[in-house]
Image (cartoon, rainbow, N blue to C red):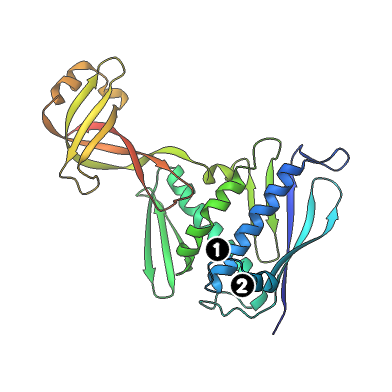
Amino acid sequence: MRENNQKITIHIMGTAMDSEKGYELSYLIKSLQKFEKISQKTYLYLTSQNRMTEKANDDFKLYINDIRPGSFKADIVVFCQNYILPLVPIVTEHRDIIWECVLKSFEFLKSIAKAKKEGKTVQIENQGNNVIVNTGDGVTINQFVYPNFIPELAERLAKPFSEMAGIVDGDVEGVAFESKTGDIILDIESSKYFKKHTYLTEKSFEIIGEMTVINSNNYKGKIKISDSEDFKDDEYSFELSNDLKYSEFLQSGFLREAKYRCSKKVIFDPTDPLGEKIVAVRILEKI
């Protein structure tokens, strides 16, 4: 049996964290609970367990100590009593395995969420023990490399990370977890990547569609799309790009099949980062 400890510093910033007035308990409890959930889910994944049993709770614990004055700052000690065999050799020290996996999962989720928020394409490829994430706009391509099990683990951690991002609301300006091996920082800007939002893809797609409902007041309506590799055969809401907003264009496609170039309007759900829910299309031109 072997004990392994990893120290991480938690820092919660904002007006809700005032050492003289006191720390607002709801924010403090939520931040610690979300970190606990993320750590436990990672431990369970690495040990192939489904829930925190009595034995698991004896083996894996989190302690908080050394609370500093000012905005809330303290150390969290990740205690793991048993040896965890890593899925792949991603770290040099055993005690870092859980935290390293949390860091990699956060980076994976953030890289995908950031790209999608900016309307960029995301491609994920498996290469041996690694998974390659390519994000870009057709001109600039960014490449990220992760251990091949990280997408599966990150999917399990997506919801608690999203819930943690929800803590950042103005009264709390940021929640950070810092260590010698890397940091997780959710501030006003980066927390937006972990919240539900709608975006328009930079990539355009060719479709064959028939406008079934048109509204000449706001240049929106419904279009039935068929024979497209990028869309399921279904009816979608549509809007027009600014240079197409004239009645004649709407009339030319009403109840007639035509070929268009369009972009997708997609809802990004941080709890399902690899999913894609198309809510509308923006028609850019008739081909």
The image position of residue 73, as x and y in percent, is 79, 52
Q: Position of residue 235 (x, y in %)?
A: 23, 35
Q: Element at badge 2?
A: helix
Disc number at residue 97?
2
Residue 101 appears anywhere in the view: no
**Label 2: few (<14), some or many (≥20) within 10 Å?**
many
Q: Is residue 72 left or right of residue 211?
A: right
The answer to which of 183 and 12 lies nearer the viewer is 12
Do labels 1 and 2 touch, CB within 8 Å? Answer: no
Residue at (49, 54) in percent of width and height? 111
Of the residues under marks 1 and 2, which one precedes in the sequence?
2
Q: Quadrant of residue 252?
A: top left
Q: Is residue 136 visible?
A: yes
Quadrant of the rendering where the C terminus is positioned: top left
Q: Residues within 10 Å of mark 1 (few under 14, many from 20)?
A: many
Q: Residue furthest left?
A: 256
Residue at image location 60% in from the left, 59% down from the top: 38
Query: In this view, which residue lies farthest toward the front?
Result: 54
Query: Residue 170: percent from the left, percent from the top?
Result: 67, 35
x 45%, y 45%: residue: 269
Q: Which residue is mark 1?
A: 104
Q: What x and y, as percent, mark residue 205?
A: 25, 42
The count of marks equals 2
State the SS at label 1. helix
Front-lying residue, 38 or 244? 38
Q: Residue furthest top?
A: 217
Q: Amino acid at mark 2?
A: Ile
For marks 1 and 2, give the one nearer the viewer. 2
